[in-house]
Image (cartoon, rainbow, N blue to C red):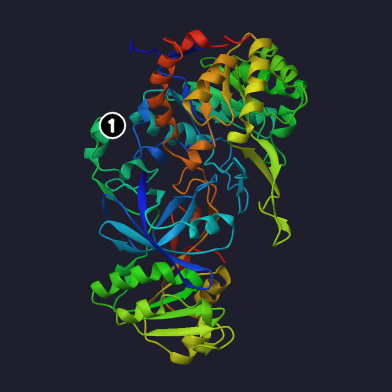
């Protein structure tokens, strides 16, 4: 991984307690959907992992909710201020399995190892390539954010995309217009029924019956659990866990999966539906 | 600026420099191999290892604190066989500095077994015995908080380790750290690492429950530096075996301070988690700092403060 300084281009309130921040840097950015960056918030000890909503040629778009003092401080930062991000380094993936490292990397003396001026995200990403033709994107709250970049990737691969977004209340709705601007039909579910289907995302799916061969979900654990139990299709699940290092070496975010202990930060955050033990 | 000599001698091992990522904050080394040149590091203390593979504690395992953090990983590790047959050999392929195996156990016999395996592994240079991990109910705490039981582990390990230096890593959660360090020295320890984390706790006041799933965990970070420094000073001056200083180190100045207090080598722990480049950044800053302080050889300042 690498540390990079990003400059805040904009940092705006887009829904209740919800901010959209655009960060630019001096390198080439190529983040895959589902990956995250780990932000050093001034005055706090540990970094804050935030998933990337859009990958710009020289920057990232993130959404965050003000839930505590750290995110409160972030929300007060203004354009021109800088943030230090931990991000991925291209070339060699973070992998404890040395057999997966390219030979030209292993053979080179360390200082001369290939290293491009390119910035990726941390962690694994979603798998748009596993969708045959029709994808269903299911986001709860800010879980919608990484699905936006995923929608762009799926559309670029010529696949059809439907988004289902769930929120508690109407004033929390975000990203719906952005999905629509991509030409993606959006189903909304709100708990009070003020907008869209009253109830959960699963209620919205049951009502609209969209066609899909693979689903992708990110949001609160109970929502994703309900989605996985309800939908009879393969899917990708993006897990969230309190992290230490964010890069796979402190083992602070390990979860038990069908294939053994996995670090959410480095082996995830995206896991196959079949991997997750609910 | 004259060339600065950062090398130190640790129980006959020559370290290029005294900076060592602490156990549990650097995985098995390979996880960071694509981030910077590991060969900059004087040594690497690998993740704590038990006889059997362990999943560790439930999540959340991490809590933010002022000037530090709490961890309750619970000794997640792949077991001693994986350490000696996979992890250490894989690291040795790309790393020429000192590889330190950090060994835990739930009985004196397990400590001895694990250390014998590590002793027989050609890719391990030094054995660090964790008698202090506060995360595991059945584990280290009992051994590290009492001079007699710390000595019994040391003695059992010393009897089976024939080729490598044995360091005992001590818990700070005790009343008299010197008594425990001396007991370990008398039982045959080649050196002392200190300190491990302090037992700590946070509560989520909205949820009215502990932040950490296991309720309590090990507190570390810059906040503990003065406490760690004091213990390093006390132990280094009371014992005649070398000390690896650990606790709250985050910059080159801290390394110098630890060494002046008596540390022969200095471990960097929690700081790696917030800044994975902490060790190379410290090493980059050291020569200029030494120059400004009139230090040419780091070895010269070890324990210089009386």
The subunit carrying tag 1 is A
Q: Quick one: SS at disc 1?
A: helix
Q: Position of residue A208 (x, y in %)?
A: 44, 91
User: Dot 1: within a 10 Å radius of its alpha carbon, few (fewer than 14), some, or many (20 or more) residues?
Assistant: some
Q: Is B208 in front, or is B119?
A: B208
- Residue occupying the point 44% across, 11% down: B295
**Residue B124 visible in this rendered orientation of the protein:** no
Residue under label 1 = A110
**Place of residue A137 in the rendered image (x, y in percent of width and height, measured from the top left):** 40, 76
Residues A258 and B75: in front is B75
Picture quadrant of residue B285:
top left
Between residue A84 and residue A38, name the one nearer to us.
A84
The N terminus of chain B: image quadrant: top left
Residue B136, by quadrant, is top right
- In this view of the protein, which residue sits in the foreground, A103 or A253? A253
**Residue located at (40% from left, 84% from top):** A186
**Quarter the C terminus of chain B occupies:** top right
Q: In this view, does B125 lie above or below A58?
A: above
Residue B51, x across and y down, in percent? 59, 36
Instruction: Count how many numbered circles sit on residues in the image.
Output: 1
Report whether A104 appears left or right of A254. left
Could you say where residue B70 lies in the image, as x and y percent from the top left?
62, 43
- Residue at the farthest bottom position: A207
Quadrant of the image occupied by residue B72? top right
* Residue B283 visible in the picture: yes
Give the residue drawn at x 36%, y 27%. B39
């Amino acid at each position: 991984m690498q540390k990079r300084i990003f400059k805040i281009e904009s940092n705006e309130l887009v829904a209740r307690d919800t901010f959209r921040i655009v960060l630019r840097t001096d390198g080439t950015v190529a983040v895959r959907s589902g990956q995250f960056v780990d932000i050093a918030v001034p005055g706090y000890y540990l970094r804050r992992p935030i998933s990337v909503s859009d990958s710009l040629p020289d920057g990232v778009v993130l959404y965050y909710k003000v839930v505590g003092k750290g995110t409160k401080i972030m929300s007060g930062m203004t354009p021109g201020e800088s943030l230090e991000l931990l991000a991925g380094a291209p070339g060699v993936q973070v992998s404890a399995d040395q057999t997966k490292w390219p030979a030209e990397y292993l053979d080179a003396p360390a200082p001369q190892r290939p290293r491009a001026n390119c910035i990726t995200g941390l962690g694994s990403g979603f798998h748009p390539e596993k969708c045959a033709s029709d994808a269903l994107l299911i986001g709860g709250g800010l879980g919608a954010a990484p699905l936006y970049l995923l929608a762009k990737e799926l559309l670029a691969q010529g696949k059809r995309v439907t988004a289902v977004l769930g929120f508690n209340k109407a004033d929390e709705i975000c990203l719906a217009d952005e999905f629509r601007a991509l030409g993606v039909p959006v189903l909304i579910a709100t708990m009070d029924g003020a907008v869209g289907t009253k109830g959960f995302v699963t209620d919205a799916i049951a009502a609209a019956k969209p066609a899909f061969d693979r689903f992708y979900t990110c949001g609160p654990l109970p929502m994703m659990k309900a989605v996985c139990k309800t939908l009879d299709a393969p899917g990708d699940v993006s897990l969230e866990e309190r992290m230490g290092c964010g890069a796979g070496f402190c083992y602070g975010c390990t979860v038990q999966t069908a294939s053994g202990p996995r670090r959410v930060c480095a082996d995830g955050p995206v896991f196959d539906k079949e991997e997750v033990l609910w | 600026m004259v060339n600065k000599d950062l090398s130190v001698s640790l129980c006959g091992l020559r370290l290029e420099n005294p900076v060592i990522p602490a156990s549990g904050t650097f995985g098995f080394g390979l996880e960071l191999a694509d981030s910077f040149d590991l060969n900059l590091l004087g040594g690497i203390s690998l993740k704590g290892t038990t006889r059997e593979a362990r999943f560790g504690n439930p999540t959340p395992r991490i809590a933010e604190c002022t000037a530090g953090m709490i961890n309750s990983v619970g000794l997640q590790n792949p077991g001693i066989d994986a350490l000696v047959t996979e992890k250490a050999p894989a690291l040795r392929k790309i790393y020429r500095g000192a590889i330190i195996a950090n060994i835990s156990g739930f009985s004196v016999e397990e400590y001895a077994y694990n250390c014998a395996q590590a002793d027989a592994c050609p890719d391990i240079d030094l054995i660090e015995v964790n008698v202090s991990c506060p995360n595991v109910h059945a584990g280290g705490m009992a051994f590290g908080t009492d001079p007699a039981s710390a000595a019994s582990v040391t003695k059992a390990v010393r009897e089976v380790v024939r080729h490598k230096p044995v360091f005992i890593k001590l818990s700070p959660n005790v009343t008299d750290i010197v008594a425990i360090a001396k007991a370990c020295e008398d039982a045959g320890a080649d050196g002392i690492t200190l300190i491990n984390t302090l037992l700590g706790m946070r509560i989520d006041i909205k949820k009215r429950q502990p932040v950490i799933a296991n309720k309590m965990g090990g507190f570390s970070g810059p906040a503990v530096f003065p406490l760690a420094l004091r213990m390093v000073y006390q132990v280094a001056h009371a014992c005649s075996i070398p000390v690896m200083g650990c606790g709250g180190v985050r910059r080159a100045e801290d390394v110098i301070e630890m060494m002046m207090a008596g540390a022969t080598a200095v471990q960097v722990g929690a700081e790696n988690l917030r800044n994975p480049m902490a060790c190379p950044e410290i090493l980059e800053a050291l020569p200029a700092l030494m120059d400004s302080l009139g230090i040419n050889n780091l070895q010269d300042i070890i324990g210089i403060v009386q």
